[in-house]
Image (cartoon, rainbow, N blue to C red):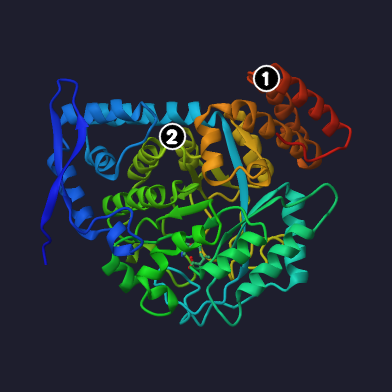
Amino acid sequence: MRRKNVGYKLINVLPAGRAYFFEVNEMYNPKSLKAEEFIDHEEILETLKFADKNKENYELIDSLIEKAKLRKGLTHREASVLLACEDNERISRIYDLAEQIKKDLYGNRIVMFAPLYLSNYCVNGCVYCPYHMKNKTIPRKKLTQEEVKKEVIALQDMGHKRLAIEAGEDPINNPIEYILECIDTIYSIKHKNGAIRRVNVNIAATTVENYKKLKEAGIGTYILFQETYHKESYLKLHPTGPKHDYSYHTEAMDRAMEGGIDDVGLGVLFGLELYRYEFAGLLMHAEHLEAVHGVGPHTISVPRVKKADDIDPSSFDNGISDDIFAKLCALIRISVPYTGMIISTRESQELREKVIRLGVSQISGASRTSVGGYCDNERPHDTEQFDVSDQRTLDEVVNWLMTAGYIPSFCTACYREGRTGDRFMSLCKSGQILNCCHPNALMTLKEYLIDYATENTKKIGNALIEKELEKIPNEKVKEIARHNLKEIENGNRDFRF
Ligand code: SAM
């Protein structure tokens, strides 16, 4: 049934004083707590229609690019027009702007993390994931606390300080108590100079009560990928199990926020549905969080479906090219400038290089997506969730980033200093990042260089730190950072602003 349109909303005022208006749907309400109202299907369809109609409206497109330069973001409708634009000169202007915004707001720091797979037991039927319940060929494995410890020591010995824990959904095998016990184990391990200082959690949608428990356990970001915002497809792609419930899944971030977790990470699994639909849905989700909770998503992840045990990505019709992938990253960067963007080792070195420039702020390194995979010398494939494209060691990734002029950051200071949610956003918006994140990145890189790096990486890194120290604007902060770097050389650890 078509719903009636109830009004007009100003989308953008053009320099000549003319304005564009578009219709809004009665049911579309970013403030609603109902999934189907804040991710309103009709609103997405009309957004796509509006974008198609205006994809050669260069006056509007130019004004949207100008608007994005204000670094206040773009609405889903505005950004969708830019996504539809096929004019190469304008796309290259969008890329330039994304690059500039990335530089201005995130500098040249790239935050490093690794996933840690705890268990691949799962009761869901997700058709793109090899952990689906009907897969009888994949060995099922769940780490004991002793095994968690071994994995964490292996990750610490590489130099990781930040993990994202991953688990299938299985109330019997992976209840919340198990996840909490693992988090406790991870934080408790003190091995040489190693420490995991931030545990992000990527587990299935759960209750407010469980989110409260995760918050109390000291997690960083709660990450949950929507997979697809298209309800009809969602139901087909998740035919069985608790994840089949579209509303429960889509409303999870609101429950997480209610439970006190104010850093949440969104994501879409690109390849499942039309990317233009997903992009509009993703931005609507971000607008919803901002409208209801006063703070947008902390991060957005951009995974694409990959080959895995019994999964063939070519069986999905909506795979996207590397060029479209890059365009999506650039547009996310200019549409939600203050939301971090994450790219995993699902993608190749070349593509990672390209999208880091266009806006990605966090990457995983040396990842293994199998349960217990870090303890083996050889990369094990038997319990893997998906094939990893970038298979380099952490030292190789760190070396590569620095050679390209980036600072690999192992910083975890913000959430440990209580700078989460809107407090983190205000730090970004106040421009204090160069006096805070920048020295923190340099100090954690120094720890990495001393404790874990190869000689060549150390040499490149020490020169980089010297050069980058000069960028700290506040003289007092610079002096403290210098002092702390000396202290790190003397064996002390864990300094932060
Ligand atoms: N079970 C949790 C859930 O339901 O969200 C945890 C997440 S799962 C371990 C991590 C993510 O991997 C999924 O949300 C999905 O987007 C992604 N994933 C699953 N199968 C994949 C595949 N074949 N290729 C790439 N990513 C995949």
Secondary structure at badge 2 equals helix
Q: Position of residue 80 (x, y in %)?
A: 26, 43
| Residue pictured at 26% horizontal, 37% vertical | 82
The residue where tag 2 is placed is 358
Give the mark count: 2
Is 272 on the left-hand or right-hand side of 219?
left
Which amino acid type is shown beneath numbered disc 2? Leu
Q: Earlier in the sequence, mark 2 or mark 1?
A: 2
Disc 2 residue crowd, few under 14, some 14–19, many 20+, Cα 10 Å:
many
Above/below status of 153 relative to 471:
below
Report the Cα–Cα distance between label 2 and label 1: 23 Å
Which amino acid type is shown beneath numbered disc 1? Lys
The residue where tag 1 is placed is 467
Location of residue 330 (image quadrant): top left
Is 387 on the left-hand or right-hand side of 393?
left
Above/below status of 373 relative to 69:
below
Depth check, front residue: 92 or 439:
439
Quadrant placement of the N terminus = bottom left
Q: Position of residue 246 (x, y in %)?
A: 36, 69
Location of residue 407 (image quadrant): top right
Residue 92 in sight from this viewpoint: no
Depth check, front residue: 424 or 405:
424
| Residue pictured at 67% horizontal, 41% vertical | 413
